Amino acid sequence: MDKVLNLDHQARGIIKPDGKITFVKNALPGEIIEYKIIKETKKYNLGQLTNIIQKSPHRVASMCPYFPKCGGCSLHHMAYLDTLDYKKEKVQDILLRYANIKPKINVIANPIYLNYRNKITLQIKDKKIGYFAENTHDIIEITNCLVAKDSINAIIPDLKKLKINSGSITIRSNYNDEIMLIINTSQKFELDFKELSSKHKLVGVILNNKLIYNEDKFIENINGKLFQVSYNSFFQVNNYINEKLFEFIASNVTNKVIVDMFCGVGTLGIIASFKAKKVYGIENNYHAILNALVNKKMNKRSNIEFLLGDANDLISKIKDNIDTIIIDPPRAGLSQKGINAILNIKPQEIIYISCDAMSLARDLKRLKNIYNITQVHIADMFSFSYHVESICVLKKQ
């Protein structure tokens, strides 16, 4: 029996019996708990919560019937506003500890924090369809996901009719509730989608990266701007926070030359192009670049150019004098080559959007000698998970 001191960056309760850190999932600060050790290492232990002797006043009954067995969400035992406080404190702690930065952080809440995700991936094993239990390959069967869009939840019960024994199904849904299924399985069979397409807006099905039904792309609409998105192109999972990102970009760029590193299907660069003199978007995903070229035409933008390749390399080949760089990298952040390229260019402003606070802190530490961090925001892109989207504005000193 021990008292929970705090939460770690993965939202696990921290206790220190005999001075050794033990992480216990689903425990909250201030709670007196009983637990059992399920893993020991030299530096820390992992514990499993078995009983709560004294509950935190901040604990709430989970709205999700699969929590905490499902490994998807980690914060359903907290009220929504408390999850925002946790994420703010988490980013503050990481930036201070790893970059020696102590900024004022603004929180951008998710206006619709349930049924917001436009994409989920379900696992299939022995014909069971659901999510993996955390740190296992055991399937937690589900018929409804609390954070997925209603159009996604509507099709989940009908997936069993496909009679897939094992594999995975990614479900994507757009603003018009059109559904795209991306199926991966080693099973050999012919699939009949007539019944599914009669009940749902089934725009396309991809089996093992091969189009087998209708289309392999659809159109998204964010703030009145249209974007073609292929099945294997990146697009933010939360359209409501995406709207906030678009508004932020629109209010923080001016009539200058802008580079959108890791541009994906061109969303942020196209939004910036409405105010910029010239925009370059760089992306190494061929399908995303094809989408971006279509999106340029759909949104009638003539002042944006897209380049296919590694942004860390190609940014150095742009001949224009770059005023602003938009960075929205993969979770790993910038490579050292990318940092060196940016420090060589020395743009007047950097807008850095990150889905991983640790890699963000590392990169800000590399940049802060010649840049002041003037704005830091966190956007609740992934409600009820411990993940958080951060937005930073850096100005050249």
Image: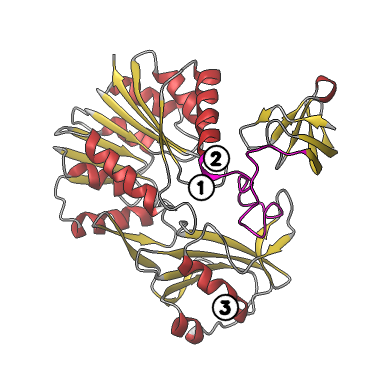
- In magenta, the rendered stretch is 54-81
Question: What is the quadrant of the N terminus in the image?
Answer: top right
x 82%, y 26%: residue: 42
> Image check: 286 left or right of 38?
left
Quarter of the rendering containing residue 140 = bottom right
Query: What residue is disc 2 on?
Result: 83
Query: What residue is disc 3 on?
Result: 158
* Eye-nearest disc, 1 or 3: 1
- Cα gap from disc 1 to disc 3, whole angstroms: 26 Å
> Image check: 94 left or right of 371?
right
Front-lying residue, 364 or 209: 364
275 relative to 147, above or below: above
Our reading of the magenta stretch's main secondary structure is: loop
SS label for mark 1: loop
* Eye-nearest disc, 3 or 2: 2
Q: Residue 254, position in %: x, y?
A: 17, 33
Q: Residue 113, position in %: x, y?
A: 47, 51
**Amino acid type at mark 2:** Thr
Quarter of the rendering containing residue 57 = top right
First reached walking from the N terminus: tag 3 or tag 2: 2
**Amino acid type at mark 1:** Ser
First reached walking from the N terminus: tag 1 or tag 2: 2
Q: Residue 275, position in %: x, y?
A: 16, 40
> Image check: 48 left or right of 13?
right
Query: What residue is disc 1 on?
Result: 383
Quarter of the rendering containing residue 281 = top left
**Residue 97 visible in image:** yes
* Eye-nearest disc, 1 or 2: 2
**Residue 358 visible in image:** no
